[in-house]
Image: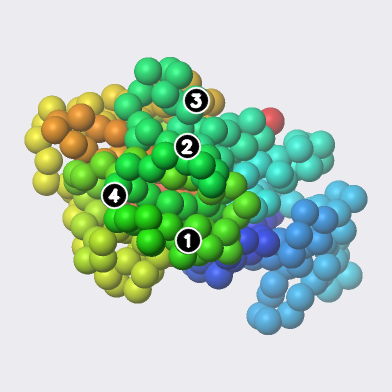
Amino acid sequence: MKNIAILMGGTSEEREISIQSAQTIKKHIDKKKYNAFLVLCVNTSEFQVIIDDTQYTVDTNNFSFQLNNEIIIFHKIFMMIHGEPGENGKLCKYFENKKIPYTSSDESASTLTFNKYNCNKYLQSLGYNVPNSQIYKLQSRIEFPCIIKPSCSGSSFGISKVYNNTEIPSAIKKAQEHGNQIIIEEFIEGREITCAVYQSNSQITTLPLTEIISQNDIFDYEAKYHDQSIEKTPAEISKTIKEKIITISKKLYIELNLAGIIRIDFIVKNKKPYIIEINTIPGFSEKSIVPQMLKCANINITDFITEQIENISL
């Protein structure tokens, strides 16, 4: 059987969420096909295999570890690190050099999508609808309301909706706790719809769309992880809007050379979908959106995980 490293942890604030996602993969992975191990990423050069609360150091020379006098070498990586150094692509070259396939997008695609400002500008250059955004500077001209957030952070950490000048300092301070580059982004009033895209049987396909209805002012961390939002799957939207979102999502998957399961978030205003974020390693905890989508589509989660593993190669 193939040895699969379910990579989790990392160095960002999303570490705990990543661990929850990895545990879901471990729970549902096909035990008849794979020997699966939870592997904690401490940093880019330190990894630990976790078995029954015991830690085993990974030999980074060949990405292996010793268990009961046996050297176990990993054949494939199921990437479940949200944030740095997984979702931003920093581990890609390491695994490519070791000739170990991984389930996420490559370094260039990951680097682009992880930086929300750079990704926004690139998508804009390709003709996609995105919110207007700028890097925060003291002399920035700001239209209210707006969104202030770190450029490179996930799980809605450090995000604020700002209504006037007096609210800016605290919003900037909050964002700076999670990143150095701060974005001021146009607030678009509309319905938030998210679309998951992946490759199945050599075809780019999507899962049922989900509408996110936050009970807070925006879909922030509290709304996302503390049951302060409603997630409707499938989203109750018109066939026209649904087809627009699916078409854009599939096109982006190809154009940005994305891989594995990804999720694209949209705001729909006046029947026009605006791309607000691309998540290349979306959450996979029991409460996360993608597992809800799989359930709605009547796709067995174990079969889905198997397909993700079998689809990857170098």
Name the residue beneath numbered marker 3: 122
Name the residue beneath numbered marker 4: 145
Cα–Cα gap, marks 3 and 1: 28 Å
Q: Residue at x 38, y 61 (%)?
A: 166
Cα–Cα gap, marks 4 and 3: 24 Å
Name the residue beneath numbered marker 2: 134
* Residue 294 seen in render: no
Name the residue beneath numbered marker 1: 169
Q: Amino acid at mark 4?
A: Pro
User: Is residue 287 found left or right of 27 in the rendered image?
Assistant: left
- CB under 8 Å between callouts 2 and 1? no
Q: Position of residue 189 (x, y in %)?
A: 21, 45
Q: Residue at x 11, y 46 (%)?
A: 236
Image quarter where the C terminus lies is top right
Find numbered disc 1 in the image and state the secondary structure of the residue it sits on: helix
Q: Nearer the viewer, mark 4 or mark 3?
A: 4
Mark positioned earlier in the residue sequence (4 or 2): 2
Q: Nearer the viewer, mark 3 or mark 1?
A: 1
Find numbered disc 4 in the image and state the secondary structure of the residue it sits on: loop
